[in-house]
Image (cartoon, rainbow, N blue to C red):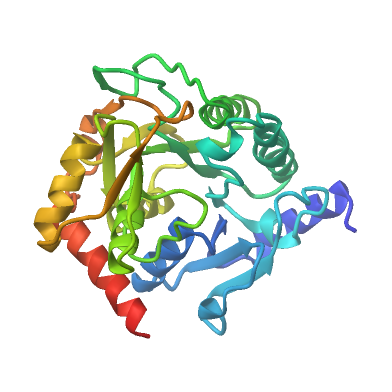
Amino acid sequence: MKSEKDHIQLFLKSLVTMNNFNVGIIGSSGFIGKSLVKRILNNKNKDLQLYLFSRRIDNIFNNLTNVTFTSFDVQNFTHIPDELFEIEVLYYLVSDTIPASSWNNCILEVTNNLLPFIHIIEKLTNGNLKKIVYTSSAGTVYGSSEYKITENSETSPFSPYGITKLTIEHFLHYFQIKHSISYDIFRISNIYGPGQITSKGLGLINTILENHANKEETIIFGDGKNVRNYIYIDDVVNILEKSIYSSRNESNTINLASSDNISIVDLIQIIENSINEKLLLKYEMQRASDNPCISIDNSRLLNKYIDIKITSLHKGILNTYDSILKSKKK
């Protein structure tokens, strides 16, 4: 195992020999990670060297030019792959929990999410790291609010998941002050779209559409009046990619959300109208871990990225349902 001194020497050597611009993605085999990799590769930037890190090796990224894949489990943060010390812009997309899973075991958030992040970034301060792009949670860091939430609104998370997300945001500010590593924090709303795996309990839109395709009912927790914001996966990665080319000298915190803040009841109506079919639903008691109301303001996002066009719910739902139906035929 290389010492900290060895890593510093490796870093200094890389300054002389490195020709490419190095971007790393921790969590490259996840829903966001896969989509982001495809987005970056589609742009065919020959000066960009992409380093992918994930627990499991994804064969779809094998034998690609300017792409290096390394098996890495963030829980094993005592061993940091040498490739990570070459990264200039690092996407940290991995999370080992969801709001419901950590509600009755808050220690999971600290041991599985917070501590690995701190240990990994602290070690990488001896490398070439200039910027961290972190996917936070618009639905949990603010807490519950009936008013539209901007990035300057009070943060008052009540779930362990949201508390940890916000704590990591604060540590990013700490690393900026201490080590001059800038950051882009994207507080993302509820993502949906082709390729999302719903088995862990995330993704209401995908869950509803998958269940409907399988002629199964979907459980709705509560009376359906909970207000949420939903954003299509392509919109998410189109914006995340822009951090590669943004200034290394500035940090940003942005609500990555659509303009649609709607209740689950209204969402169900939109889905039924989009696919022109009636859904099978079952209502059960509200879960304590669920945020009853969150209405997100995306003005900063739209002002910063004026060329971005947010996918409508109708179009996104149709694209997602079409993808689910196609996968069933394989």
Name above or below for residue 10 compared with residue 8: below
**Is residue 287 something one can see in this rendering?**
yes
Instruction: Say which residue appears at 70% left-offset and 54% top-offset.
Output: 85
Residue located 30% across and 66% down the image: 215
Residue 323 picture location, percent across and down: 29, 72
Q: How many marks?
A: 0
Depth check: give the residue in front, 15 or 102.
102
In this view, the residue in front, 6 or 80, is 80
On the picture, is 122 further left or further right than 176?
right
Asked if 195 appears above or below 257 in the picture, the reply is: below
Q: Percent from the top left, x then y, of residue 313?
A: 17, 51
On-image quarter of the N terminus: bottom right
Above or below for 174 versus 200: above
Residue 175 falls in image quadrant: top right
Q: Residue at x 68, y 36 (%)?
A: 108
In this picture, is 41 found above or below 147?
below
Q: Which residue is depicted at the point 16% across and 57% down?
A: 278
x and y, in percent, of residue 295 in the image: 26, 27
Residue 241, picture quadrant: bottom left
Is residue 302 shown to the viewer in this render?
A: no
- Image quadrant where one finds the C terminus: bottom left
Is residue 111 found left or right of 224 in the rendered image? right
